[in-house]
């Protein structure tokens, strides 16, 4: 979809707009960015809504099925960490490519990121989606960016794995889409599930989106819903898949399971429309 290269110069008006007030602790002014583009939201409660996507680099998890490994899988040792947790029969399904950090990650100022987001919005897109990677790793640098975008009237969605607290973010105008990882991610339970953090997101009226591969995943979701006391109408089940055939096959089965358990179904609209492509 739409994409812009960052300008080498920034106007004084943007400098004034996105410069934060000096405090005793100066917040980071750089964001590690993977890509910025305009598309439609492909998942969750705002599916189909035109949005500008800010995909940030780095993640604190290494999920086996991750389809954005280019945001964090940069070194051979990290590749081995992923493979060590994956059963032998699953290894042929992994993207084994290791990405070059210098080619995939740009260190951009908050001002330049804001200008690119505003340019891509073209004056009529009013929704910004922060995704990753795990965007809350960089939450200190995000504060001033989000505060400024909210003042401009944008609605902000934050996609997060639910392991980092949302403290410090404004209450109004920011919607969290929390995606706790199940055992199908091949991450240890104590690394991927933090009950108190999930309860904080629950108090922020977040929705909870789970990636589903097979029937036993539904049992895990039910157990976590009971553990955290998540209302079922705030739970979305989404089929894992990066090709249309897999997505449709799992989607038909999963939609039936959502009816059975009282959960909501989330498709992956961007995969259905454009396939497994970046920048859409």
Image (cartoon, rainbow, N blue to C red):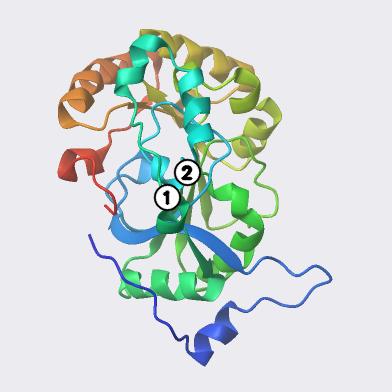
Read off the residue under disc 1.
Answer: 100
Question: Pointer 2: residues within 10 angstroms few (<14), some, or many (20+)?
Answer: some
- Where is residue 274 shown, x and y percent of the image? 17, 45
Above or below, 183 against 197 in this view is: above
Question: Pointer 1: residues within 10 angstroms few (<14), some, or many (20+)?
Answer: some
**Foreground: 43 or 28?**
28
Above or below, 67 against 258 in this view is: below
Q: Is residue 276 left or right of residue 131?
A: left
Q: Residue at x 44, y 47 (%)?
A: 71
Classify residue 4 by image quadrant.
bottom left
Classify residue 240 by image quadrant.
top left
Q: Is residue 159 left or right of residue 120?
A: right
Kindly give the residue lying farthest to the right in the view shown: 24
Q: Is residue 129 left or right of residue 20?
A: left
Q: Residue at x 22, y 39 (%)?
A: 271
Above or below, 262 against 12 in this view is: above
Tag 1 secondary structure = loop
- Where is residue 106 shown, x and y percent of the image? 47, 63
Q: Specify the quadrant that holds the N terminus.
A: bottom left
Distance from Cα at disc 1 to Cα at disc 2:
6 Å
- Where is residue 196 shown, x and y percent of the image? 70, 30
**Foreground: 271 or 6?**
6
Residue 116 — which label?
Answer: none
Q: Residue at x 26, y 32 (%)?
A: 242
Tag 2 secondary structure = loop
**Foreground: 160 or 29?**
29
Residue 74 — which label?
Answer: 2
Above or below, 64 against 28 in this view is: above
Q: Residue at x 33, y 75 (%)?
A: 123
Q: Are marks 1 and 2 in contact (CB under 8 Å)?
A: yes
**Foreground: 13 or 89?**
89
């Amino acid at each position: 979809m739409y994409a812009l290269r960052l300008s080498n110069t920034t106007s004084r008006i943007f400098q004034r707009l996105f410069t934060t007030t000096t405090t005793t602790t100066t917040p980071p002014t750089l964001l590690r960015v993977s890509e910025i583009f305009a598309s439609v939201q492909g998942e969750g409660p705002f599916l189909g809504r035109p949005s500008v996507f800010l995909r940030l680099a780095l993640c604190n998890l290494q999920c086996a099925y991750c389809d954005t490994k280019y945001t964090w899988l940069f070194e051979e040792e990290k590749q081995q960490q992923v493979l060590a947790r994956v059963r032998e029969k699953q290894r042929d399904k992994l993207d084994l490519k290791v990405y070059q950090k210098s080619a995939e990650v740009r260190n951009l100022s908050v001002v330049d990121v804001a200008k690119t987001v505003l340019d891509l919005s073209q004056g009529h897109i009013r929704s910004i989606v922060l995704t990753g990677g795990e965007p809350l790793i960089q939450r200190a640098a995000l504060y001033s960016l989000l505060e400024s975008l909210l003042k401009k009237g944008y609605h902000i969605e934050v996609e997060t794995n639910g392991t980092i607290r949302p403290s410090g973010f404004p209450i109004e105008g920011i919607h969290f889409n929390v995606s706790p990882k199940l055992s199908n991610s091949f991450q240890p339970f104590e690394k991927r599930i933090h009950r108190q953090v999930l309860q904080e997101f629950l108090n922020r009226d977040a929705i909870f989106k789970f990636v589903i591969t097979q029937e036993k995943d539904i049992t895990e979701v039910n157990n976590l819903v009971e553990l955290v006391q998540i209302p079922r109408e705030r739970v979305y089940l989404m089929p894992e898949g990066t090709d249309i055939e897999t997505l449709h096959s799992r989607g038909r089965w999963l939609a039936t399971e959502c009816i059975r358990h009282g959960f909501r179904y989330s498709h992956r609209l961007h995969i259905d429309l454009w396939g497994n492509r970046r920048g859409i």
